Image (cartoon, rainbow, N blue to C red):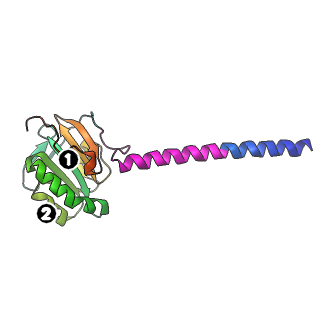
């Protein structure tokens, strides 16, 4: 009888341990999912972070480096349905900000997105997963949006609501 009781107690303790472990894993997965929706995934720079060095040329032949970058930086990728949903609203946002204050990085082959953005932003086409600008921002998620001033990220997100409508930019 004592063996049965000991086995039941051990089985009960094992069940409680399993329940606690499962709850911890679910809590962590939920926190990561919420962070990605808010645009603050474990990858990518957060507000206050410095942008790493990079050097690229836009589709119009304009050179851009981390030193000359000020304003909004947006990452889009080919085949990204969330990117295509964001595009019309982002074009309107970029028009408000002014072309000189917006850099759009389009990863992959998506000429329609490049054409739509080229009217309102300086555009860089990059190979997947995003090229030198994505590396400088440590960005692996699209769409991703950043506001940069003086080499530092001022705001970051995955939605326009995460960004200020009129970012405070130095020299603008």
Instruction: Between residue 123 and residue 91, name the one nearer to us.
Output: 91
Q: Residue 97 in the image: x percent, y percent?
A: 12, 48
Query: What is the magenta range?
Result: 18-46
Disc 2 versus disc 1: distance between alpha carbons?
Answer: 17 Å
Q: Residue 21 in the image: x percent, y percent?
A: 61, 44
Quarter occupied by the N terminus: top right
User: Are discs 2 and 1 less than 8 Å apart at CB?
Assistant: no
Quarter of the view holding residue 43: top left
Q: Residue at x 33, y 47 (%)?
A: 39
Residue 73's mark?
1
Q: Residue at x 41, y 48 (%)?
A: 34
User: Circle 2 sits on which residue?
Assistant: 115
Left or right relative to 6: residue 132? left
Q: Residue at x 14, y 48 (%)?
A: 102
What SS does tag 2 mark? helix
Quarter occupied by the C terminus: top left
Q: Residues within 10 Å of mark 1 (few under 14, many from 20)?
A: many
Q: Residue 116 in the image: x percent, y percent?
A: 14, 62
Examine the rendered structure and indicate whether residue 20 appears above or below residue 59: above
């Amino acid at each position: 009888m004592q063996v049965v009781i000991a086995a039941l107690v051990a089985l009960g303790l094992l069940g409680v341990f399993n329940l606690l472990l499962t709850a911890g894993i679910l809590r962590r997965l939920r926190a990561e999912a919420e962070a990605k929706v808010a645009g603050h995934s474990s990858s990518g720079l957060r507000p206050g972070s410095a942008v790493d060095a990079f050097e690229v040329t836009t589709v119009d032949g304009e050179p851009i480096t981390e030193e000359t970058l000020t304003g909004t930086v947006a990452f889009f990728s080919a085949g990204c349905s969330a990117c295509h949903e964001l595009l019309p609203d982002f074009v309107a946002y970029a028009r408000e900000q002014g072309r000189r204050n917006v850099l759009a990085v389009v990863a992959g082959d998506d000429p329609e997105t490049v054409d739509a953005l080229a009217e309102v932003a300086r555009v860089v086409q990059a190979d997947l997963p995003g090229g030198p600008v994505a590396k400088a921002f440590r960005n692996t998620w699209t769409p991703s949006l950043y506001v940069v001033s003086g080499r530092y990220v001022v705001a970051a997100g995955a939605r326009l609501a995460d960004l200020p409508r009129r970012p405070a930019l130095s020299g603008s």
